[in-house]
């Protein structure tokens, strides 16, 4: 007779297996998964920081180069967490090896947790790599590492969940690039990565508050630099609420077998 | 106890197509069971529901007394599935595919490694353990699907067309492996288009057609229903004229080949005596058509006529 403890041991093995598989996947193809973000952000630092940044002048009391570091790190986290889950889960649907998991006794929440943890790992790996590049160009001292880490993990979790939902609904490889191109990129660029929303007219400041990326970028900036346009508590609350909504929705998709069962 | 107990299983796909129309089917523990049917009969839908890849519309599925609705994890842990289509990550090495599957079932890595080696060796895949899936031939992929399905040591193994596209030699070795597995106590349900395979391996049989069970019986009883059987004889010499063989219906296929139809009252001994009396020597003899194939076609044709009527 299996006990609750045996169940948890099995779940832990299953979780480790999915996570290990995901980490191995993006590590094996690091030239496609890790390197591009590092190169892109290096170019941002060179162009916006060194060449144009000096002419822009300080923002929120920081050099422009220092000001954009948190946003650029988080941009790497967001795009990589999202694209890891969306491409991995969609590939498993496309090649039908998702069936390996569906026939197994792995509970839906473990399947979701495994894929999301894989996305978080890639997001954080890229985040750390971009941070190392940033340290080469700047002399930033981290203001509050715990806040930075928490916001980084929560942001990666949220966008991994987004990637998962996208993958569930996707019917072709085109479908997995539509959301990153037409939704994720505009939200990130308009989420205060390159500017403080205080520069915007009041109306656009209010509109910007509807963008969840704004809360993440500002909370991350609070952790890294100690300044933010948004109160930290509000940012945490907003991100947590979004995670909860997307997690519940993802589990409901898995339970009903949307996109993976007939 | 039934290994599989299915009651009133119904599946209506989006768009209204009814793939299963209230199927009732029981498979005894330890059985080697064949599920046959023409293309589109509902076999894969049936297997998909039992193995949790397809959502059922109505009905009950129970595996070793565990109900699919109430205890899906319990049901899944009892079943090993070898699907019809390849469903691998083609970029993974063979060993990873098996170890990952064990991991999904919550089997610790150390135990999984021992089992993976055992099954890969038994299926002659151990030397290929580091080969990427995409570099394997079709036959090797089919064998790997069996190893993958066995790594959690299921009590019920379901094989959907396991030897499709596999050469004779590999097919025979797979048969022998499956016979051994069944002898060790694993219940096996098999769908196949090779009726010779079902006749050679299975004890009980169900024929599904149009989403309904058309026949559910033992293979012995089913084969006993054959009233006539046709043999093809290769002769040593030439026969210019068909001899009278007292009750045997003969037909010449060419100068050296005869076709003989025998009913239940005839014996092979009687046939050979009659041939010897007429100075005809036989080099070899074979069954013209697989017996199960003939019955299968008869059943499906009869049902087709009934449905049209």
Image (spheres, rainbow, N blue to C red):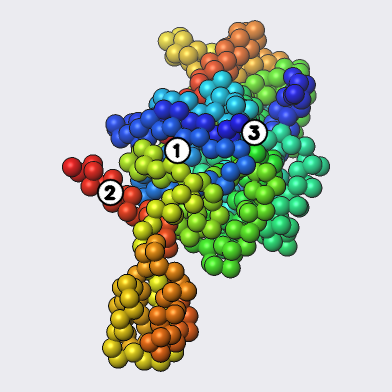
- The crowd level at tag 1 (other Cα within 10 Å; few <14, some 14-19, many 20+) is many
Q: CA distance from mark 1 to mark 3?
A: 18 Å
Does residue B151 appear to the left or right of A183 in the view shown? Answer: right
Q: CA distance from mark 2 to mark 1?
A: 23 Å
Please state which of residues A173 and B259 is positioned toward the viewer in this rendering: B259
- What secondary structure is marked by label 2? helix
The residue identified by callout 2 is B302
- The crowd level at tag 2 (other Cα within 10 Å; few <14, some 14-19, many 20+) is few
Query: Cβ–Cβ below 8 Å for labels 2 and 3?
Result: no
Q: In the image, what residue occupies the spot 48% across and 50% down?
A: B219
Q: Position of residue B47 (x, y in %)?
A: 48, 39
Q: Position of residue B24 (x, y in %)?
A: 43, 32
The residue identified by callout 3 is B77
The residue identified by callout 1 is B46
Locate residue B18: give its quadrant.
top left
Whether residue B174 is situated above or below residue A39 in the rendered picture:
below
Q: In the image, what residue occupies the spot 29% across and 31% down?
A: B16
């Amino acid at each position: 007779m299996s006990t609750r403890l045996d169940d948890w041991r099995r779940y832990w093995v299953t979780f480790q297996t999915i996570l290990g598989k995901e980490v191995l996947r993006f590590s094996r193809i690091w030239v496609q998964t890790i390197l591009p973000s590092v190169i892109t952000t290096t170019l941002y630092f060179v162009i916006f920081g060194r060449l144009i940044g000096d002419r822009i002048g300080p923002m929120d009391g920081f050099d422009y180069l220092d000001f954009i570091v948190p946003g650029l790190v988080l941009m790497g986290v967001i795009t990589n967490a999202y694209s890891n889950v969306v491409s991995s889960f969609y590939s498993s649907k496309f090649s039908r090896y998702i069936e390996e998991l569906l026939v197994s006794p792995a509970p839906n929440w473990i399947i979701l947790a495994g894929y999301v943890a894989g996305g978080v790992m890639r997001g954080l790996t890229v985040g750390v790599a971009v941070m190392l590049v940033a340290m080469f160009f700047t002399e930033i001292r981290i203001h509050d590492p715990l806040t930075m880490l928490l916001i980084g993990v929560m942001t990666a979790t949220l966008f991994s969940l987004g990637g998962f939902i996208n993958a569930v609904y996707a019917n072709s490889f085109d479908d997995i690039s539509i959301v990153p191109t037409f939704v994720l990129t505009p939200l990130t660029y308009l989420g205060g990565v390159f500017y403080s929303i205080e520069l915007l007219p009041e109306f656009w400041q209010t509109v910007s508050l509807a963008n969840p990326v704004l809360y993440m970028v500002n909370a991350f900036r609070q952790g890294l630099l100690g300044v933010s346009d948004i109160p930290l508590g509000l940012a945490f609350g907003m991100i947590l609420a979004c995670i909860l909504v997307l997690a519940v929705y993802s589990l409901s998709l898995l339970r009903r077998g949307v996109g993976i069962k007939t | 106890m039934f290994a599989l107990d299915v009651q009133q299983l119904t599946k209506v796909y989006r768009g209204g197509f009814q793939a299963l129309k209230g199927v009732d089917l029981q498979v005894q523990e330890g059985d080697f069971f064949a599920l046959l049917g023409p293309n589109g009969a509902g076999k894969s839908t049936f297997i998909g529901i039992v193995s949790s890849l397809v959502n059922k519309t109505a009905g009950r599925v129970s595996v070793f007394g565990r109900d699919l609705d109430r205890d899906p994890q319990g049901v899944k842990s009892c079943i090993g599935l070898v699907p019809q289509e390849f469903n691998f990550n083609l970029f993974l090495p063979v060993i990873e595919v098996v170890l990952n599957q064990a991991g999904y079932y919550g089997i610790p890595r150390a135990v999984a490694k021992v089992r993976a080696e055992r099954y890969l060796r038994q299926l002659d895949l151990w030397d290929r353990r580091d080969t990427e899936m995409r570099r394997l031939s079709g036959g090797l992929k089919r064998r790997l699907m069996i190893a993958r399905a066995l790594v959690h040591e299921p009590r019920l193994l379901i094989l959907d067309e396991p030897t499709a596209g596999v050469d004779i030699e590999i097919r025979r070795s797979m048969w022998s492996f499956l016979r051994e597995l069944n002898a060790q106590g694993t219940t096996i349900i098999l769908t196949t288009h090779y009726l010779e395979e079902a006749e050679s391996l299975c004890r009980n049989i169900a024929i599904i057609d149009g989403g309904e069970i058309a026949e559910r019986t033992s293979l012995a009883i089913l084969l006993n229903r054959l009233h006539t059987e046709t043999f093809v004889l290769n002769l040593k010499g030439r026969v210019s004229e068909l001899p009278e063989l007292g009750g045997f219906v003969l037909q010449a296929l060419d100068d050296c080949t005869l076709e003989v139809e025998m009913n239940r009252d005839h014996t092979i001994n009687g046939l050979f005596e009659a041939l010897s009396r007429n100075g005809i020597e036989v080099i070899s003899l074979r069954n013209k058509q697989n017996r199960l194939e003939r019955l299968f076609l008869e059943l499906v044709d009869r049902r087709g006529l009934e449905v049209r009527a």
